[in-house]
Amino acid sequence: MTDTVNTYYKLVKENVRGFNYTNSIEGCFSLFDPMVIGIYHYVSPRHLQKYADEFTFRYNSRKDTDCSRFNSLLSDCTDRLTYSQLTK
């Protein structure tokens, strides 16, 4: 297990710094797996970053209304995305 690794022991002591703590990222990661399994069923390594980007947007805007989230998404669209750009 990673809990017994000497280098990991130093990190365990550092789990809170100000308003930042490891529970935030653990909570985020606990939602990523069910998203992949429940919505997409499979994520290829080639497109993993795109799935992670979508998840990050959803997670960061989780407290917004649907309308606000949609407007935010549209405001980030600056130019046309072609299929070949999407599948690079």
Image (cartoon, helix red, strand yellow):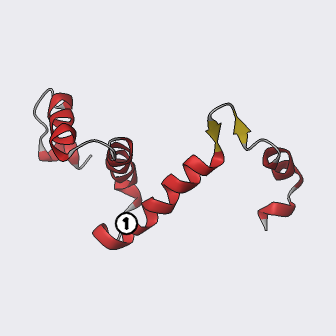
Q: Amino acid at mark 1?
A: Val
The secondary structure type at the circle numbered 1 is helix
Closer-to-camera residue (24/49): 24
Residue in the image at 27% along x and 46% along y: 88
Q: Is residue 44 left or right of residue 81?
A: right
Figure check: 35 above or below 66: below
Figure check: 73 above or below 1: above
Q: Is residue 6 left or right of residue 76?
A: right
Choose top left, top right, bottom left or bottom right for residue 47.
bottom left
Residue in the image at 33% along x and 72% along y: 38
Q: Give percent across and percent down for residue 30.
A: 51, 62
Q: How many marks on residues? A: 1
Choose top left, top right, bottom left or bottom right for residue 4.
bottom right
Q: Residues within 10 Å of mark 1 (few under 14, many from 20)?
A: some
The answer, for residue 76, to whether it is visible in the render is yes
The answer, for residue 41, to whether it is visible in the render is no
Closer-to-camera residue (27/63): 63
Q: Give percent across and percent down for residue 1.
A: 79, 68
Residue in the image at 73% along x and 44% along y: 15
Q: Is residue 77 left or right of residue 17?
A: left
Residue in the image at 83% along x and 45% along y: 13
Task: Determine the residue located farthest toward the right in the rendered image.
Answer: 6
Q: Give percent across and percent down for residue 60.
A: 38, 41
- Residue hosting label 1: 36
Q: Give percent across and percent down for residue 27.
A: 53, 55
Q: Is residue 85 left or right of residue 28?
A: left
